[in-house]
Every structure is written in structure tokens, then in C-alpha cells.
Image: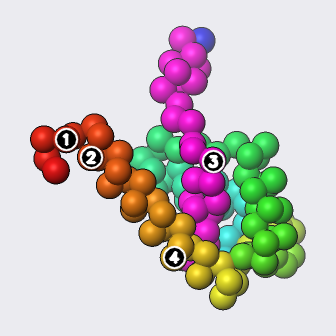
Amino acid sequence: MPEKKERYQNRIELLQGTLDLLILQTLQWGPQHGYGISVAIRNRSGEILQVDTGSLYPALHRLQKQKWIKAEWRVSENKQRAKYYQLTAAGKKQLTRERTKWSQLSDAMAGVLNPEQM
């Protein structure tokens, strides 16, 4: 049981909007179903960022409503019917904007946390 508690304590809470950026970036690599997006984020973050379905699917619906992603039903690799999400042209533009904002935030945080390096 301590393993689960330790994992929870080491969990990093995402800033509001960060999940959208992660989803858009993941879809930049190609269409993916929800579980695949979650796995890609976890794998690419070195197992640090874990997105639960309670956060992922509302975010996917929100991004779809913004027309930054579109979805279609397909058959997955394991022969299951799954909804695949894909970045739209508007989503690519939004990804560029979000990456710029993230870069600015990251630089600002670095300036506060490591002022001697500025």
C-alpha cells in the first residue's frame, strides 16, 4: 500500500491548460485514440505525467468543441472500435500559440528559481 501512497504524493498537478497543450502536441505526431494519447503522454514524460480518464475525455471534448481536434470512429490495432482524434489546421495554430506561451512561462519560472543564471 505505501507504493500507491508514494505515487500519489509524487504526482505532479498540471497547470490549467497544460493538458490541452499535451494533447495537442501528442496529436501532432498523428491520429490517436484516447488511451493511446494517455500512454504517449505517460511514456514521453518518463512516467511522470499520468492523465486519468476523468481529465482526458472532458479535455478532448473541449478541444473538439473549439475545433482544434476532430474525431472519427475506427477499428483499433486490437480490433476494438475506438474514437480516433486528429489535429485540425486550427489546432496546429493553437499548438504553436500554446507552445510559445509555455516557453515564456518556463523562462519566467527559470528566472525566479535560478536568478543567478539570468
State yes or no: discs 3 and 4 in contact (Cβ < 8 Å). Answer: no
- For badge 3, the amino acid type reads Gln
The percent coordinates of residue 22 (x first, y second) are: 57, 60
Q: Residue furthest top?
A: 2
Callout 2 secondary element: helix
How many angstroms separate mark 2 from mark 1 (CA)? 5 Å
Whether residue 50 appears in this view of the structure is: yes
Q: Which residue is mark 3?
A: 16
Callout 3 secondary element: loop
Between discs 1 and 3, the one toward the N terminus = 3
Between discs 2 and 3, the one toward the N terminus = 3
**Label 4 neighbour load within 10 Å: few <14, some 14-19, many 20+:** some
Callout 1 secondary element: helix
How many angstroms separate mark 2 from mark 3 (CA)? 21 Å
Residue 56 left/right relative to 18: right
Q: Which residue is mark 4?
A: 96
Total number of numbered discs in the rendering:
4
The percent coordinates of residue 21 (x first, y second) are: 58, 62
- Given residues 52 and 13, the one toward you in this image is 13
Q: Which residue is mark 2?
A: 111
- For badge 1, the amino acid type reads Pro
- For badge 2, the amino acid type reads Gly
The percent coordinates of residue 35 (x first, y second) are: 70, 56
